[in-house]
Every structure is written in structure tokens, then in C-alpha cells.
Image (cartoon, rainbow, N blue to C red):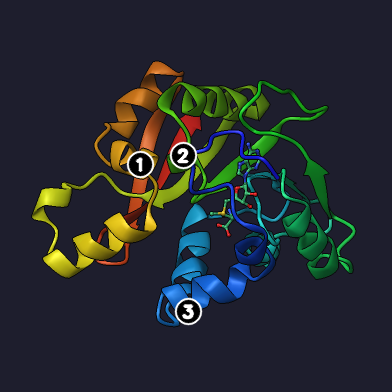
Amino acid sequence: MNKLYPDSGVELSKFTASNYDKVMNIASFGKYKSFINRAIADIEISKDDKILDLGCGTGRNILLMNKYTGNNSLLIGLDISEDMERQFEENTLNYPNISFINKRIDQLFELEQKFDKIFISFVIHGFPHEIRKIIIKNAYNNLKSGGTFNILDFAEFDMAKMPFHHRFIFKKIECKYAFDFIARDWKSILMDNGFDNFEESFYFKNYVRLLKASKS
Ligand SMILES: C[S@@+](CC[C@H](N)C(=O)[O-])C[C@H]1O[C@@H](n2cnc3c(N)ncnc32)[C@H](O)[C@@H]1O
């Protein structure tokens, strides 16, 4: 597949997409499972929530979110990768309240219904900043009033202050957009786009953050 954004690291190769969950387990030295469990608990999902996952990948996160929901919930994942779609469909086969839509999140869209929570995990950092603003608009336009946009991604940190071995790994594995992402003030960007009432939780030596923002 030709990349939409050639410098992006979130448009994955066929190999990485097909083995994504295993790659994440290995890359995190086995710590991914406990970390993602904590992050998803911190979203504070309610039983009847309607949740949209932007760039949902294999469905691993949506299945974890589904543990907090009941019969009236609805969880929809959007992604453009056919390899992710195949794994998502296999993984969520027995869950009628979970579905997948093959859709670009970097173009404006409005789905038929509005959501209580929108989640985006390790996706938004991988786009040019102007495109990130479209993704934020999509989150705003598809949320109910009072709903929350939950961004799980790199925190804001100064690469120059990282220990050498952390900086070396970050520079080796991340794309150029990630370096720009960590240098921005995300609360003020979200505030400029209509969000307020921020809450944040940190993981992985504070390099990763769940930033929750409300649509009033
Ligand atoms: C790094 S993976 C993260 C997957 C998942 N959110 C997770 O945390 O496990 C990035 C995901 O974003 C998807 N993606 C990249 N560009 C996209 C786009 N323009 N529209 C929708 N999904 C996209 C990729 O196919 C991939 O599944």
C-alpha cells in the first residue's frame, strides 16, 4: 500500500500490521499488557457508553474497553489497514456490539450517531500537524456534548533531557512527526478546538500520557 504520508510511522508495513500485538509486547519488554490495562481503566468507561476508536488496529484495545460495558453499549473501530481489519474481525467475532469501519480518520467525517467517548491510541502523533487538527475536529464533531476525547500517546517531554539510551531508542523507532508532537502544548491545542476540563494520567516513566478532554 502506498503511504498517504510517506514520513509517517503509523502507516505500518504489512509485516508489522500482521504481527502488531506481538511486536508491541516485544518492544515494551512484556510491559504492554499491564500498561494498556491501566490506561483503559483510567478512561473510566460507563456501562452504556458508545465508544469510537480512531486507528483501532487489531481490536485489542476495544476488547479491553468492552470489559467495562454492558448490553446497551456500542464500540466502533475505524482503521484503513486491511491487515488490521482482518485481525479486528477475527478478534471481535463473538461481540455483536463491536464493529469495524474501514475509514480514513485524516479526512472530515460524521458518523450517523454521536459517541460518549472517542479514543485514539498511538496514532495522532504520526501525522503532520495540519492533519492532526482534522482528526481533532473529527473527534469533536462525533462526540456527544459532555463526551470525552481520550488521547493515549507520547507525553510532552524534552528529548534533550532524556537519558542517552532512551533518546537513542526513541529516535531510532519514531518518525519525524513524533518529535514535533512531543514539543507541542496539547491542552491549548485542544482548547482552541473547543475542548476543556482536562485530566491526565502518565505511564512508562512519564513518557506516555492519557489526556482526557471534554466537549462541554
Ligand atoms: C501504531 S498503530 C496503533 C493501533 C492501535 N490504536 C493501538 O494502539 O494498538 C496505528 C494505526 O493507525 C492506523 N492508521 C494510520 N493512518 C490512518 C488513517 N489515515 N486513517 C485511519 N487509520 C489509520 C494504522 O493502520 C494502524 O492500525
- Of 15 and 89, which appears nearest the observer? 15
* 39 sits to left or right of 4: left
Q: Position of residue 197 (x, y in %)?
A: 38, 32
Residue wearing tag 2: 7
The quadrant holding residue 202 is: bottom left
- Of 214 and 140, which appears nearest the observer? 140
Answer few, some or many: residues within 10 Å of disc 1's Cα (few below 14, many 20 plus, some between 14 and 19).
some
Residue wearing tag 1: 176
Residue drawn at the location 71% of the way across and 59% of the way down: 69
Q: Residue at the bottom extreme?
A: 30
Badge 1 or badge 3: first in the primary sequence: 3
Circle 2 — which element? loop
Image quarter hosting the N terminus: top right
Which kind of residue does numbered mark 2 sit on? Asp
Residue drawn at the location 51% of the way across and 70% of the way down: 24
Answer few, some or many: residues within 10 Å of disc 2's Cα (few below 14, many 20 plus, some between 14 and 19).
some
Q: Is mark 3 within 8 Å of ligand 1?
A: no
* 137 sits to left or right of 58: left
Q: Position of residue 96 (x, y in %)?
A: 90, 58
Badge 1 or badge 2: first in the primary sequence: 2
Residue wearing tag 3: 26
Badge 3 or badge 2: first in the primary sequence: 2
Residue 150, above or below 168: above
Residue drawn at the location 54% of the way across and 72% of the way down: 23
The quadrant holding residue 67 is: bottom right
User: In front: mark 1 or mark 3?
Assistant: 1
Which kind of residue does numbered mark 1 sit on? Lys
User: In front: mark 3 or mark 2?
Assistant: 2
Q: Position of residue 82 (x, y in %)?
A: 78, 52
Total marks drawn?
A: 3
Q: Is residue 216 visible?
A: no
